[in-house]
Amino acid sequence: MARLENYSFGRLTVDGHEHTHDLIVLPSRVVGDWWRREGHSLHLEDLDGVLDDLPERLIVGCGAYGRLKPAPTVLAALRRRGVEVELLETAAAVQRYCELDAGRTAAALHLTC
């Protein structure tokens, strides 16, 4: 399970390795350099590489100022798949992830705005 710490605008340390690009943390792996088709939107296709690996909870770090906005269809599709989604500013998302069972939680984190 990944250990998240030291978030600041544009930076997050995961298991001792500093990330400077958006990332997805799964129970079994970390996907660095996470790219979305529209920078401040989240579409289901942006999760294509991890969709089948998502556990029951997904914490979305919407950026330091909350600018990342998931499309309502994404939230509905994830709920239909049995994934509970929490949307938080990234600092709060990192904190929330650390409070939860990392074996049953994933995090999709936008590190900047």
Image (cartoon, helix red, strand yellow):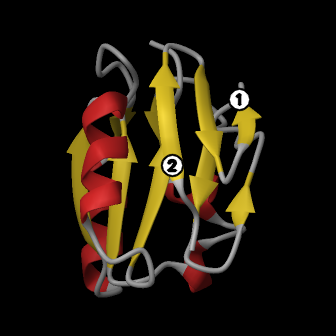
x then y, percent, for residue 76:
25, 67
Pointer 1 local density, CA inside 10 Å: few below 14, some 14–19, many at least 20: some
Amino acid bearing label 1: His
The structure residue drawn at horizontal position 45% and vertical position 84%, both measured from the top left corner, is 103
Amino acid bearing label 2: Leu
x then y, percent, for residue 9:
50, 13
Q: Relative to 60, say whether 73 is above or below.
A: below
Q: Is residue 86 left or right of residue 38?
A: left
Q: Is residue 32 left or right of residue 24?
A: right
Helix, strand or loop at label 2? It is strand
The structure residue drawn at horizontal position 67% and vertical position 54%, both measured from the top left corner, is 15
x then y, percent, for residue 91:
33, 30
The structure residue drawn at horizontal position 28% and vertical position 29%, both measured from the top left corner, is 89
Q: Relative to 85, say whether 68 is above or below.
A: above
**Label 2: which residue?**
4
Q: Nearer the viewer, residue 89 or 83?
A: 89
Question: Which one is closest to the eye, mark 2 or mark 1?
Answer: 2
Q: Nearer the viewer, residue 49 or 76?
A: 49
> For the C terminus, which image quadrant?
top left
Q: Is residue 54 left or right of residue 69?
A: right
Residue 26 appears in which quarter of the rendering? bottom right
For residue 21, the mark is: 1
Residue 80 appears in which quarter of the rendering? bottom left
Among all residues in the image, which is located at the extreme front?
Answer: 16
